[in-house]
Image: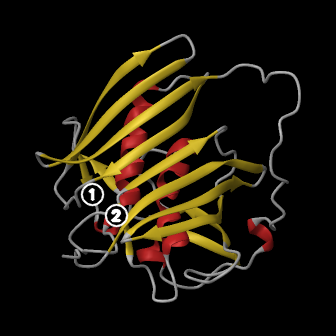
Amino acid sequence: MTEPFFKRDGTSGWFVPQPVCAGPWDPTSLHGRVVAGLLAAEVERAHRAPDLIPARITVDLYRLPGFDPLRVEHEVVREGRRIRVVNAEIFSGEKSVGHAAVQLLRTASDPAGTVWKPDDWDAPGPDAVAPQDGNAMGRMWETRLIAGGMGASGLRRLWMRDIRELIEGEPISPWQRVALAADFASPYANAGDQGLQFINTDITLYLHRLPVTDWVGFEVVDHQSAEGVANGQCALYDESGRIGSSTVAALANAPLTQ
């Protein structure tokens, strides 16, 4: 059986990270994607309802967590007729390492009329794209490249699918799946011809609907940087079309200027 990212520590409410959680910057710290995924999972467990869509989650990644057990604290800060706003904080040991702000919006009928939107994605589906060889960060995920590898110029598109449970023995929900994947906007949008030299400090995931398939499609739509501060953005898809976007803020992995 493939190793999960986390195991529950009995009934204590703590989550024990497994070795596969290691991130790219320091082998003794966790990958940002698993932090975002765990925050999303705990908010979903406590605050989701069938008629609420998690329309936005912003995750601040302000400290690299080590492999100490993690716990998540959360609270509703606004409960309205059409909106629920939740704040969540994640702790590694006793240190706060990240924060999430989540908007859940109640579904309703679309208004009458037509609003402009981009053309439908014309990329081939994952079954039409050859599987990729390679390690994929210790086999955290599976990718199928459509166009433009990491750091390539021009069009960059791929499919991604998680191959591990987030929490041992618990199926990954559609929201958890896309929340886990969203961090990939940072390397895919911000890598260049010298590799990835930006460390993302946040993830903001917008969704107008949840994915209905296991594969999440990425298309880089923007990268900008100045004085060591960058933004990157990817449009996100499932096999039925556009589902939202992931935007990241990032800092250059370089000494501060004097």
Please give the label number shown on residue 17.
1
Q: Is residue 223 left or right of residue 111?
A: left
Q: Amino acid type of disc 1?
A: Pro
Quick check: 169 left or right of 75? right
Residue at x 71% of width, y 19% of height = 108
- Residue at point 20%, 71% (across, down): 28
Residue closest to the far left: 94
Residue 24: x and y, percent?
34, 74
In terms of secondary structure, where does tag 1 sit?
A: strand
Quarter of the C terminus within the rendering? bottom left
Amino acid carrying mark 2 in the image: His
Residue at horizontal 61%, vertical 41%?
Answer: 207
The residue most toward the top is: 81
- Nearest the eye: 196 or 96: 196
Label ID, residue 31: 2
Which mark lies nearer to you, 1 or 2?
A: 2
Q: Is 120 left or right of 136, judged from the image as shown?
A: right
Q: Residue furthest bottom?
A: 194
| Residue lying at the far front of the rendered structure | 258
Q: List x then y, in percent, for residue 53.
A: 59, 30
Q: Is residue 36 above or below residue 130?
A: above
Q: Residue at coordinates 49% horizontally, 12% vertically from top-left? A: 80
Q: Nearer the viewer, residue 14 or 30?
A: 30
Residue 138 has which mark? none
Q: Nearer the viewer, residue 101 or 222?
A: 222
- Packing grade of label 2 (10 A; few <14, some 14-19, many >=20) is many
Which element type, helix, strand or loop, lies under badge 2? loop
Q: Position of residue 26 (x, y in %)?
A: 25, 74
